[in-house]
Amino acid sequence: MIRVLACVLALTGTASAAEDLKMAVTTSFHNSGLSEILLPAIKEDTGIDVQLLVVGTGQALRLGEAGDVDAIFVHSRASEEAFIEGGYGTHRREIMYNDFVFVGPGADPAAIAEATTAADALTRIAQIEAPFVSRGDDSGTHKKELSLWDAAGVSRGGDWYRPVGAGMGASLNTAAGMNAYILADRASWLNFGNKADLALLFSGDPVLFNQYAYIPVNPELHPHVKNELAIELEGWLTSPRAATLINEYTISGETLFTFNAQPAF
Amino acid sequence: MGDIWEGLVAGFWLVVTLDPDLVEITLRSLQVTVTATVIASLIALPFGAWLAIRRFRHRRATIAVLNALMGLPPVVVGLIVYLLLSRSGPFGVFGLLFTPTAMIIAQVIIITPLIASIAHQSVRDIWAEYHDLLISFSTTKRQRIATLIWDGRRALMTAALAGFGRAIGEVGAIMIVGGNIDHATRVLTTAIALETGKGDFALALGLGFVLIALAVAVNIAIHAIGQTESEGKW
């Protein structure tokens, strides 16, 4: 029994040693593959071992509120501002952006490729009741999709509208299986391995702009969070080195993210 | 069909080239599940034996509950352990959430009823056989339990292996309490879920075959050590 306890303690010890920082990020950020470029560089430059918890924006905010992570990196402005107002985070720092795109069956039965705006594209889908997969998981992408539906002002009740309650990749898998339309962020779409018959059909409307922001969890509320490391990481994420890595990250020749952090005051 | 073939090939290459990431997550899978199985067995085997020989008022109900708990939904266990270990939960001060320890705790809760239930069934059969003998030697309760566990060791090993089998393939609970953090809490099952999410079915399936092979290898190894199914032994 003592040996078992010693074993358990040893496990705990290795897990919390060194300069570990837990950061909750969105599935869309992680599925883009950018984290695999940034994390080793962060480790090299600052010595911080960033441990990513890949969840939806909704859960990322919950993790921050409970103090289970040291910082969050998400993309849903309204919820982020509510998070700051609630005193859970110290401040919000914009880092980079990419955009959302509409993906759907290659044959494009709703002809959204000819749509003029995002609202127009959704109206066309609703008119012919083409199958549409929604994330349905309270993530940043999901919230964006809901706001687009509201802006379009069309009803989405019906069998053709399928909220799957899953991450970006899993939802894309579902859409590929059903040959349905779906809203995805460009990075996840380009990095997705199981495209089947799906194709990128509509993009470019300014409302599809997708801003990522970094928020350190408030150390006054949760004294155990590693605020110094979180601030150090923020410094790195807004540095010229991060800018280069983010701007130069491409998949099959396409740039995915644009760095837009403002220099420190 | 093509995907399955590609999965086999991917799994084969991962193993042959001893991919460092694969080795790391495989060892972590083993570390978590073996520790959980050992702890759960230390609780469940004596408890199962005790339940077989001891007569008390609510014995029937206890056994029924124990059997029902074999079907404990891992995702619910995960959620409860998560809420308990969260910084804002009652055990938050220990900072255990998103560590292998949290995963071990969740797995112990999931497999202890399973091991105890199977152990109880096997010990009950042996107890029927040994009852008169052990009573006539006027043994203490502790001695009886020790004898039954020792003489029933092969059946109890099967109980422990059933627990191991359930834990090694489990994803719902450890995904929630472990968080699938690369180089910290990623294990085979959560890696499979992740690769499926990325649409990389070949790699996911390759990892799946590694997981199955691992479960088979552990079972064979345990049977070899225990020398079951060999001549002259039962």
Image: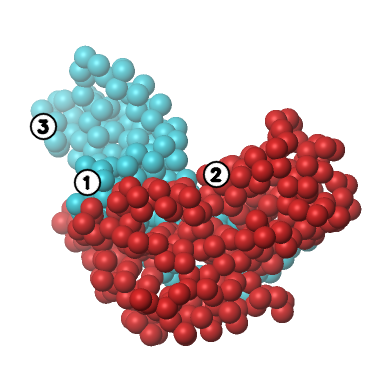
Chain colours: A red, B cyan
Q: Secondary structure at mark 1?
A: loop
**Distance between mark 1 and mark 2 Cα atoms:** 28 Å
A14 vs B232, nearest the viewer: A14
Residue A187 visible at all: yes
Which residue is label 3 attached to?
B140
Amino acid type, label 1 = Phe
Which residue is label 1 attached to?
B91
Image quadrant assignment for residue A93: bottom left
Q: Which quadrant is the C terminus of chain B positioned in?
A: top left
**Distance between mark 3 and mark 1 Cα atoms:** 38 Å
B184 vs B92, nearest the viewer: B92
Q: Secondary structure at mark 2?
A: loop
Q: Is residue A259 left or right of residue A44?
A: right
Labels 3 and 1: the sequence-earlier one: 1
Q: Is residue A21 left or right of residue B186?
A: left
Image quadrant assignment for residue B129: top left
Kindly report which numbered mark, 1 or 2, lies closer to the viewer in this rendering. Answer: 2
Q: Is residue B128 left or right of residue B140?
A: right
Q: Residue at x 35, y 24 (%)?
A: B65
**Circle 2 Cα neighbour tier, 10 Å, few/some/many (<14 / 14–19 / ≥20):** many
On screen, B90 above or below A248?
above
**Circle 3 Cα neighbour tier, 10 Å, few/some/many (<14 / 14–19 / ≥20):** few
Q: Which residue, as the protein is rendered here, is positioned at the far top?
A: B57
On screen, A171 above or below B145?
below
Q: Residue at x 54, y 52 (%)?
A: A140
